[in-house]
Each structure stands twice: as C-alpha cells, then as structure tokens.
Amino acid sequence: MTVGSKRTIRCVGALVHDSNGRLLLVRRANPPGEGLWSIPGGRVESGETDEAAVTREVAEETGLSVTVGRLVGRVERPAPNGVFLIFDYECQVTSGVLRAGDDASDVAWADSATLATLPTTDGLVEALSEWNCLPRA
C-alpha cells in the first residue's frame, strides 16, 4: 500500500494491562528501536487480520496468549523507504508465562514510575497519554 509517494507497512501493537494497572512492555532486540522499550507488536503478514497479527506478535515476543479487544488508536512512524502505519489494540491476557522471545530482549510489567525511567520508542508515552492508556502507579 502507498500513501502519497511513500510505501506504508501495516503494523499492530498490543496494549495489555494487568490487574494492577501495569503495562506490558518489551525491549526491542532488533531495529527499528533496538534497545528501546515499547508495547508488543509488529508487521501484519500478507493475508493476516489485525487480530491474528496481534495475537501472534504477543505470543512470539512475550509467551502470553491474549484476547484482542477494541482498536485504541493508530500512529505513523518512519520506516526505511516508507511509513509504518501502526494500529494499537486493547488486549487481555488469557494464559501463558511471561518470557522474552523472538524480537524481544526483555519483557516487563511496568507501572508509571518504572515507565518514566525506561528509554522508550519515539512517541510511545505521548500516544499512551493521549489514549488514556498509561500504566497506573
């Protein structure tokens, strides 16, 4: 898909909060954003629905199974030769054991104080704030 003269790459993200209001974060193991913390997510593969992509990405990166809920928001981020168009969905954990896998070098449940200390991907905290999805204290 192209927007104007730029190629767009459809991506998804998962906004997962635990019962204490903490937000599930992954530290990216690869570019873009290598070493930075963000929500689990990635590219939507050809023929895949957003829901299937969110479920797959969360499982691959965190070991957790989720139920995908409502679309919370969308953001655009620069990509090599184009733009990442990222659709972020509210999710609930249904099973699994938290562990870093696939494209994540670490995973964590972060409260607001912890999030404030982490190096995060560009625009993450601003988007979470705008969507009222920041973790609780």
Image (cartoon, rainbow, N blue to C red):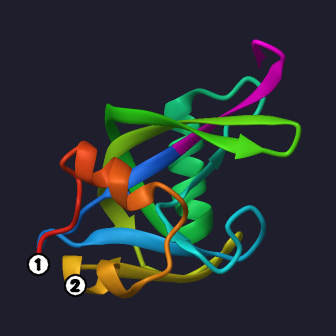
Q: Residue furthest top?
A: 4
Circles 2, 1 touching at the beta carbon (< 8 Å): yes
| Residue 13: percent from left, percent from top | 49, 48
| Residue 9: percent from left, percent from top | 73, 32
Q: Is residue 21 magenta?
A: no
Q: Is residue 4 magenta?
A: yes
Q: Could you classify mark 1 by the number of other residues whose Cα lies within 10 Å: few (under 14), some (14-19), or many (20 or more)?
A: few
Question: Which residues make up the magenta segment?
Answer: 1-12
Find disc 2 in the rendering and name its residue. Answer: 113
**Residues under labels 2 and 1: Cα distance?**
6 Å
| Residue 99: percent from left, percent from top | 52, 82
Is residue 99 visible to the viewer in this orientation of the structure? Answer: no
Secondary element type, mark 1: loop
Q: Residue furthest right?
A: 81
Q: Is residue 27 above or below residue 70?
A: below
Q: Amino acid at mark 2?
A: Ala
Horizontal arrangement in the rendering, residue 136 relative to residue 31 (left or right): left
| Residue at 51% in and 60% down | 40
Q: Amino acid at mark 1?
A: Ala
| Residue at 58% in and 27% down | 49
Find disc 1 in the rendering and name its residue. Answer: 137
Q: Which one is in front, 72 or 33?
A: 33
Horizontal arrangement in the rendering, residue 85 relative to residue 30 (left or right): left
